[in-house]
Image (cartoon, rainbow, N blue to C red):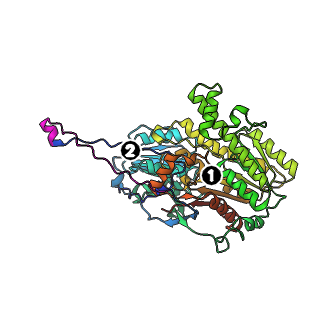
Amino acid sequence: MTSRPGTDGGEALISEFLRTSREMIAAQRDVLLGYLGAVPAAPEPVPAEPAEEPDVVVAAPKRYLMREFDLADSVPVDEELAGLRFAVVGEGQVAELLTARLAGYGAETELVQGAPRQGADGVFHLSPSFPDDFALYQAVLAGGPRWLIANGPADGARGFFRTVAREYPDTVARVVEQPPESTVDDQVEALLAELSAGDWEPVVVRRDGARRGLRLTEEGLDPLGGTDAGPAGDGTAEAEALGLDSDSVVLLVGGARGITARLATTLASASRCRVELFGRTAVPIDGEEPGIATATTTEELRAALSGGGLTEPAEVERVLRIVEAEREVRGTLRRIGDLGSPVRYHSVDVLDAEAVHRAVKEIHAEHGRIDGIVYAAGAVEDELIAAKDPASFDRVFVTKVEGASTLLAAVGELPEAPKFAVLFGSIAATLGNRGQSGYAAANDALEALGHRWSTVYGRRGLTVHWGPWAPTGAGDPMAAPDLMRDYARRGIELIDPEEGTLSLLRELAWGDEGLTAVTYAASGW
């Protein structure tokens, strides 16, 4: 089996909301002194010069599109497979023929419906489905197979297998996307061919009998789209091109904080459109209690809460996070209103389908229109596949995908669909990322969801896979000092929030209307 090529730094550059970790390197005793039973004397401590911490670089994002490229063809050879053990997970004609063909090459083969016995050299999975199959893949990977090959396409499979490839560098982890017109024989031949392929591509697209890989390619917008957004660089020209004005209604889902808040203020500044916001934070109408209203910093607020009757540190921190979130929401609403846009915040859980449908209908009934939607909700629970609880994978996947599906279904029931639907994805889906199997799979599935919506309704459905952003405020998780230092040490450039939101407006206004996915990241790789 060929060895995996070395990394080129890309893995470090694609982490989004990455949690930092420190490597512990144990010192090894001198072998000779060990044999002699001697213990080396501890060296005199030498004061270390404090290392100068690099600064975080914040920059305008670059634009990337996923493009196909040719891969070498391959055909399995008898002697490569003789004596090896394979498991085929699935049923039907493809499963039966594949099992027979592997046996014909002299391989020991079992056909199973669930997780196979550990110790197989290779595992073929014929009907992948996410999030249901995470536990199956977790069990298979625990056995350390040389090959893990899935028969695709399947929503979420690209992002998932890109992450598997990063976490299990000794396993050829791959989803093979078969064309819809492929026969049983075509599919089996394509799957068998992957056993002798000399590359490590996690996604292989079969097209016209050839193998094709996928890679991100930097491609700017045309000259018009590459210029400043409007005469003052404020997005006015883009808003006008999109038909957004003071009569327009734009619905943003994902709270009134962070990136969602920044985009909402940019839209308000550029068009004075009405802004409707969905978020889980429940904002008290009457504001804060007098005892904490005067606390302006985090430390002052923590002291006020502790002095107000809360005794448990964990409870203090929990309430502190709630208060700060509520403050950020109220601040966002004030800023949008000050820019001249009517704004309203709805406390809605995207996983409550009834609540989402009801709120969408109420907005349309009041204004007679919804011109555009932006879906930015999601959950992040990072952990390596080997240690990840399947329930955690489900939560991450469902929050992103089912929430978006519910919203798209709700606006699809309106008399007229919105002009555009923007879904916020992640670069983890396009390149994979250690510890983010669920997040990568969810955002990959999000892209497929947006593509189908665009096809059905004939409207602009665009998934934007973002790289990491610079903090948008003091309460932003991205503002954590350890995380900022880690990004700086790794040389990861962060998306400037103002440039990021303007890039989205440019994409909507000047980008190819047939394009359903794009990646924006400040760092290259």
Magenta span contains residue 177: no
- Quarter of the image with the N terminus is bottom left
* Most frequent secondary structure within the magenta stretch: loop
Residue 173 lies left or right of residue 242; in this view the side is: left
Question: In the rendering, at what x and y percent does residue 105 appear?
Answer: 38, 51
For the residue marked with disc 2, what is the amino acid?
Glu
Decide which of 345, 88 is in the foreground and name it. 345
Q: CA distance from mark 2 to mark 1?
A: 29 Å
Residue that extends furthest to the bottom in the rendered view of this protein: 223
For the residue marked with disc 1, what is the amino acid?
Thr
In what element is the residue under mark 1?
Answer: loop
Question: In the rendering, at what x and y percent does residue 418 appear?
Answer: 78, 56
Residue 17 lies left or right of residue 168; in this view the side is: right
Q: Which residue is mark 2?
A: 23
Q: Which residue is found at the position 50% from the left and 66% from the top?
A: 69
In what element is the residue under mark 2?
Answer: loop
Q: Which residues are magenta?
A: 32-55
Question: In the rendering, at what x and y percent does residue 382 appear?
Answer: 52, 42
First-in-chain label (2 vs 1): 2
Residue 264 lies left or right of residue 165; in this view the side is: right
Decide which of 356, 52 is in the foreground and name it. 52
Crowding around mark 1 (Cα neighbors within 10 Å: few <14, some 14 to 19, many 20+) is: some
Q: Which residue is found at the position 56% from the left and 29% from the top?
A: 313
Quarter of the image holding residue 45? top left
User: Can residue 458 be spotted in the picture?
Assistant: no
Q: Which residue is mark 1?
A: 472
Image label count? 2
Camera-near label (2 vs 1) is 1
Residue 27 lies left or right of residue 204; in this view the side is: left
Quarter of the image holding residue 279? top right
